Amino acid sequence: MSKKNNTMIIIIGVVIVIIAIIIGVFGMNMMSKKELFNPEDTILYNEQEVTINEETPKPQGANPSEESSDDTKVTVDDNDTANEENNANATSTTVSYDYKKLFEEAKENIFWYEPNLVSVYGTNEAWQYLDKNWDGVMPISIVDDVIKYIFVDKDGHRINNEVYDNLEAFSNDRIKVAKIIDDKWLYGMIDKEGKEIIPCKYKEMYKFTDDMAVVGIDTPNGERYGVIDKTGKEVIPYTYNSIHTVSEDLAVASIIDETESSEEAMYKFGYIDKTGKEVIPFIYSFAEGFSEGLALVSKIDDNNNETMAFIDKKGNKVIDLGDRYYTVGNFNSGRAYVAIEEMKGDTSNLKFGYIDNTGKVVIPMIYSDADIFAFDKALVCKGEDLDRVQYGYIDVDGNEIVEPVYGYIEEFSDGITKVGILADASADEEDVENLEEGTYVFGFLDKKGDTIAECQYIVAERFSEGLAPICKKGDDCEYYYGYINMSGEETIPADYYFAIGFSDDLAAVQDGDTALWGFIDKTGKLVVDYEYDEVSSVVNGMAVVQKGNTVGLLRLKK
């Protein structure tokens, strides 16, 4: 064989090897992407018409994974002969829900909330949340003239035909739901499988504590409150004008004293235990819940003068505050904030400080505002000009952990707080010269008050799974999103038009050229291409997505 032929064979062999490597690498990428995301797993929704029967059990909903054309309506109705007799006397209301509108009104507000929570989509101000570890049915909002909510399972199938007007998470196994019945908002509860535990019949329903919840109903004497257990059984009868959540085994309650002439003096507050037994008599004009064994109460005398005190669980007066303070907070970490008027009757320039559990002022009255202690830290404020207030944190001895120099500050979360200063106060004028007056730039501090990231970002969201979305100015003077870690290092470059927090190790990002959305992992690798018009964050391996006129659930992880 000639040397020329040998050379050709070698060249052909090399080419084959290169092609094999390319195919192998491409195949591996495709396999890894398919493992993470298979387009066939997308659960598509389109326009759906739902028939709601208020008096009979609701039939299983149509399979929403079956895609229909833009003009097709799927009617969910009960044609079962067994239910025809029950349906004969029932009043049905047909409501058309257009899934295409899901993002139209809500998209401006979808992503601006706690990154470790997923918001239940809606256009109203009352945003509700479910924890990212929620392992039950998933709520989806549907937009017609008003917001409605339905529930789907993890395959995207509707679990029933129940449609709710509002909802919120009570805990990891309960959801508070609401329906408008006869023009009244009535509340009930379902479990994480979507099963109704308590029907929507209460005018008010508050969060469960120790498996008990305060509820309100209408009575001939007006609205009255009682307590139910997690099964809906009445524990405390509906005899009180108000009941606060139980704290330290006692709950504040109020009754109406018809013998009092003034409306202000008519309401009497006292304390009851978990059985409804009166423990501290109803003799106070106002009362707070117990904290660290003490509760703040007040009385109004015949001259309409209010005096305050802290009492113990037997009703004994422990700290007599008299009328020295304009406002007083609850005890936490052995401290309670108090405020005085610099000039009697002038509440525009209050001065705040803190007392201990003997009533002694232990942190001087030097702050223009103050909050209760949490984890041995308290948020305080200096400055009289509302446009230039300065926030910081102090410890229980009054030491400034975070110096009050920030115009914006958040509560600590995982030992980190987000802070902000006015852009015109930033040291780096070049970064902020194009910002509007009054705009803040943000950064992060650790629990010692040390800087993690300087105040330089026009947007800085809270950390989620160790990373925080930030927005900064690029070389072209446009603003782009990226991510920093908890050391302040930019681990994913600011190359995106928009970005939201990580959840389930994935984050949604928007491409600046196409304005389409995709998903990246924590290395910044694009694992789902830019192909969606709108997306949500990932929850339980799924995200709500919109492509064209179709909205659905996208399964990203098995």
Image: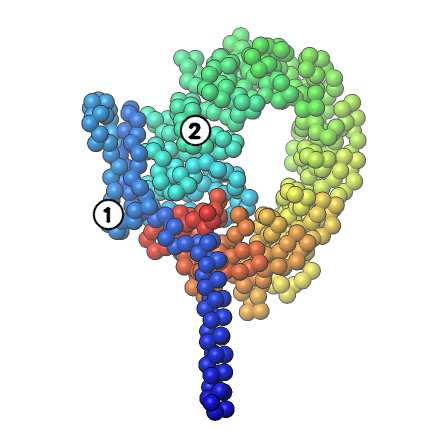
Residue in view at x 57 percent, y 66 percent: 474
Horizontal and vertical percent position of residue 63 = 31, 41
The image shows residue 192 at horizontal and vertical percentages of 45, 32
Quadrant of residue 490 within the rendered picture: bottom right
- Residue sitting nearer the eye, 229 or 107: 229
Callout 2 amino acid: Ile
Q: Which residue is mark 2?
A: 190
Vertical side of 3 occupied by 321: above or below? above
What residue is at 60 percent from the left and 52 percent from the top?
A: 467
Instruction: Give the percent coordinates (x, y) of residue 413.
Output: 64, 42
Tell me: residue 84, above or below residue 96: above
Residue 424's place in the image compared with 476, above or below, is above
Amino acid type at image mark 1: Thr
Q: Which residue is tagged 1?
A: 72
Residue 243 or residue 257, whichever sits in front? 243
How far is disc 1 from disc 2 in space, using C-alphas?
Answer: 31 Å
- Residue neighbourhood size for the residue with mark 2, other residues' Cα within 10 Å, grouped as few (<14), some (14–19), many (≥20): many
